[in-house]
Amino acid sequence: MNSGDVAFMLIAAAMVLFMTPGLAFFYGGLERRKNVLNTMMSSLFIMGLASAMWVVAGYSLSFGGNNGGFIGSLKWFCLNGITFEAGPYSATIPHLAFVAFQMMFAIITPALITGSVAGRMNFKALLIFIALWSLVVYYPLAHMVWGEGGLLGSVIGAVDFAGGNVVHISSGVSGLVLSIMLGKRLGFSKVTYRTHNIPFVILGASILWFGWFGFNAGSALAANGLAVHAFVTTNTSAAFGMLSWMLIDMIKEKKPTVVGAATGAVLGLIAITPGAGFVPIWAAILIGAAVSPISYFCISVIKKRFGYDDALDAFGCHGIGGIWGGIATGIFTDRTINGAARWNGLVFGDYRLFLAQLLSIAITIVIAVAGTFLCASLIRLFIPLRVSAEAEKAGLDLSQHGESAYPAFNGLD
Amino acid sequence: MFKVEAIVREDKFEDVKSALNEIQVHGITVSQVMGCGKQKGYPDHVRGTVVDINMLPKIKFEIVVSSEEWAERTVEAISKTAYTGNHGDGKIFVYELLDTVRIRTGQHGPAAIY
């Protein structure tokens, strides 16, 4: 046991938790005024629900034992049997510290989905969906990528340092599916939805960036050189993501936008997540610089072409960013940085990791699509997924929560 | 020249705006206001304590049209769209105007409305 590692991991875990309210601000600021509380609540309540589920069964199902490479078992139901001794996933920190750190990932991942369905989902349906989705999609994916004997990690040999697959691709794709199942917001192509609080977007993006150091560096599970490496790749990718988007804005609109800069930074963070502890720092430059144009294209061209209402671009950012990050990890991984990777990336002369990455991304997408469709279809049999037209027009803050965010301010955004 | 002032529910804002556009009435001013009528408020709860609120948020449309015929058309469009049948649907007031001026060109009267 190493007290430096333990201290670092606890702090990292707290930083990752802080990302969820950061996400609430990021999404809340992007959404219309009348839905801001609902948008933020959609992230906030998961801090409660996902924590509760994790402690009872989530950790055990994700990391406890192995069933066919797909899911764990209930051997650690209610964390029974988990001690302060170093656990199977790390030699220098108590098992319980690993549990706590991973719990924060189980909280933020479903919160990312809520961005796609902002403004029209029945909150009760969302609550039940998040619970089911955690069971059907998140725990299996966490097991498959990080759990012992997991299909994607242990068997296929794909790598995912901090959750490009488990967190970003899964939530982004699930958000897309759910947004299609819910349908578009009223007046989608006619009404301009203004970002109602850009300072919130800045605040949210900043908290996310800060917390991401815990997310990525903490995934080294120790206060060591690998954590430092992940720290630097994370920041570098974010920086180039931001600059890249600002450049696109300058070219297209002649002015760099705040929302664009914030989005670009978050995209850089998303893209480096699977490779933070595997790729060289110069690769982080390329990964961050490339993710913004890719995502920009997806949001401005592909979304318009297909006409789906991914309201806050959860798929456009997390889905696409995660997919690019996973592929880039297959290109740039250097085993001398982290021997946990079985093979080198393409630029270092091996194609096997690249193929493993593609395969694991494809499997992740399939699971996310199938799982989301299943959960939402099941819920739909009992309660409506979407709010009524009147409730949508009145705003979800009023109709779902009976609260008003800024009762004294006037404004029509 | 007539001014139509309509106070409607917040969630009817988009619908009334579309309805006005459909009858070719394009010059409108919208503001968010607070007000009450016979309802005089409704009981609300903040962390379990009952709070009395008298002012309710509404949307006010102000539309200037060139003739009584246009005013009637506007009033009818708004009435139909903003109706729900519940208390709080709002009211419409019609004023006769003394003058209208287009600032850019300096025109007076009905010519300034088109």
Image (cartoon, coloured by chain):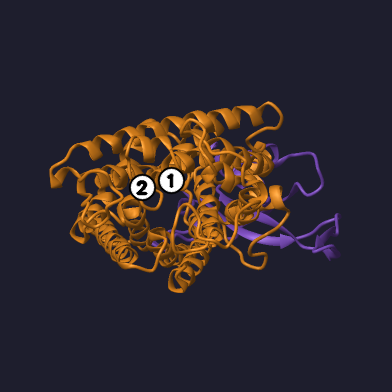
Q: Which mark is residue A344?
A: none
Write down the quadrant of residue A351 in the picture: top left
Residues under labels 2 and 1: Cα distance?
Answer: 8 Å
Which numbered disc, 2 or 1, marks the residue closer to the eye? 1
Residue at left offset 70%, top offset 47%:
A399
Q: Is residue A294 visible?
A: yes
In the figure, is residue A124 to the left or right of A227? right
Residue at left offset 14%, top offset 46%:
A347
Residue at left offset 64%, top offset 48%:
A53
Tell me what hue chain A is rendered in.
Answer: orange
Pointer 1: residues within 10 angstroms few (<14), some, or many (20+)? many
For the residue marked with disc 1, what is the amino acid? Trp
In the figure, is residue A154 to the left or right of A56? left
Tell me what hue chain B is rendered in.
Answer: purple
Residue at left offset 34%, top offset 60%:
A265
Look at mark 2 in the image and give the residue it sits on: A160
Kindly indicate whether the residues beneath marks 2 and 1 are on one polypeptide chain. yes
Look at mark 1 in the image and give the residue it sits on: A146
Pointer 2: residues within 10 angstroms few (<14), some, or many (20+)? many
